[in-house]
């Protein structure tokens, strides 16, 4: 069984690759940019077959698809940092929308009978009203960032190709996922790295933070990649599924838990530059549809996820 992961060297891609290389019947292939972070794959580099590929280049994508002829495709490659999508909206939309279109077209032209998973995002829901919590898959979309608009377009493209060409496509809308190897631009990892730097004496005992009030639904990335695998094993073609814990926690709680792991006295400093132009104050999901369909459940508690993130940075700063 050949499995192709786009964005394999990224945070989620590397964890999915790590999970799949443990399966005897799976041959893992991956694509990423030539300057990707190989550090994320250092422990499994010999277990995967890697191709450099810019998903925004159709010819490059088609060559890889034709060479591998994958049975399963997990499309994870994306511009994933939301604040960057405000700074570079055209780049964000082009990467996320046209990149996916190239993959779908390459599969269609190659006449492959591949099962395709598209990693969409809960950010698509955007402005969620209090009476809509927890968010179900049927909730209206009110995206609040260029990133969210791009992810919504990916979502709808997946549905359209399923309907138009009878392609086996499953879309997942993951809520906030966290874990070791998470990029420092994301909130939990940013806090953890700053603590690790303070412990090593490389930063003054002050943590810079943005808005600590938003409530988010955090799930460990290792639980999320299990869900992605199950989505193509037990999910139904054409469906969209929320992937989340169903529990809401303020960003401030994430910071408090991380601070509980250190003996250093650390001051908190709010940095207005870290605030978003528009933010979703509460985003908690309902994943009962996916749980019922696949039997998936979360296994790793928030405290363990955060401890692992901090330990990762303690080893890498």
Image: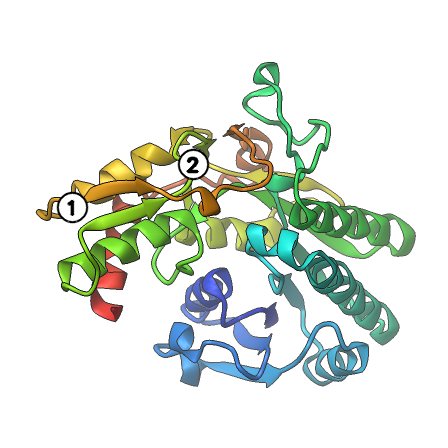
Please provide percent x and percent y for residue 4.
61, 71
Assign a secondary structure to mark 1.
loop
* Left or right: 247 as drawn, with respect to 120: left
Front-most of residues 167 and 94: 94
Q: Residue furthest top?
A: 131
* Left or right: 279 as drawn, with respect to 118: left
Identify whether 190 is placed above or below 105: above
For label 2, the crowd category at 10 Å Cα-Cα, with few meaning under 14, some 14 to 19 and many 20 or more, is some
Instruction: Give the mark nearer the N terminus: 2 vs 1.
Output: 2
Identify whether 284 is placed above or below 207: above
Q: Total number of numbered labels?
A: 2
Picture disc at residue 93:
none
Q: Is residue 301 visible?
A: no
Q: Residue furthest left?
A: 263
Front-most of residues 247 and 98: 98
Label 2–label 1 contact, CB within 8 A: no
Please provide percent x and percent y for residue 72.
65, 65
Reading the image, the residue beneath label 2 is: 211
Please provide percent x and percent y for residue 58.
80, 76
Reading the image, the residue beneath label 1 is: 261
Residue at 29 percent of width and 58 percent of height: 193
């Amino acid at each position: 069984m050949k499995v192709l992961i786009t964005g394999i060297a990224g945070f989620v891609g590397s964890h999915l690759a790590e999970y799949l290389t443990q399966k005897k019947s799976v041959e893992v292939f991956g694509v990423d940019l030539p300057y990707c972070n190989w550090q994320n794959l250092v422990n499994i580099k010999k277990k995967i077959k890697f191709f450099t590929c810019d998903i925004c280049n159709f010819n490059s994508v088609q060559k890889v698809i034709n060479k591998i002829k994958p049975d399963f495709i997990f499309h994870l490659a994306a511009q994933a940092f939301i604040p960057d999508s405000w700074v570079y909206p055209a780049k964000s939309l082009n990467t996320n929308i046209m990149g996916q279109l190239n993959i779908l077209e390459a599969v269609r032209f190659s006449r492959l009978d591949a099962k395709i998973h598209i990693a969409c995002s809960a950010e698509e829901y955007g402005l969620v009203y209090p009476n809509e919590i927890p968010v179900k898959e049927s909730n209206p979309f009110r995206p609040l960032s260029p990133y969210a608009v791009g992810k919504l377009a990916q979502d709808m493209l997946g549905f359209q190709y399923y309907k138009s060409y009878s392609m086996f496509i499953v879309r997942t809308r993951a809520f906030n996922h966290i874990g070791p190897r998470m990029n420092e631009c994301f909130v939990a990892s940013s806090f953890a790295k700053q603590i690790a730097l303070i412990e090593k004496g490389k930063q003054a005992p002050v943590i810079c933070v943005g808005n600590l009030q938003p409530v988010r639904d955090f799930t460990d990335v290792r639980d999320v990649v299990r869900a992605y695998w199950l989505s193509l094993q037990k999910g139904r073609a054409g469906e969209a599924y929320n992937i989340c814990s169903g529990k809401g926690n303020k960003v401030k709680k994430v910071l408090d838990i991380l601070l509980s792991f250190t003996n250093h006295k650390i001051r908190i400093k709010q940095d207005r530059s870290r605030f978003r132009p528009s933010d979703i104050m509460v985003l908690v999901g309902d994943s009962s549809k996916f749980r019922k369909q696949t039997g998936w459940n979360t296994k790793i508690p928030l405290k363990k996820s955060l401890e692992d993130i901090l330990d990762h940075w303690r080893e890498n700063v």
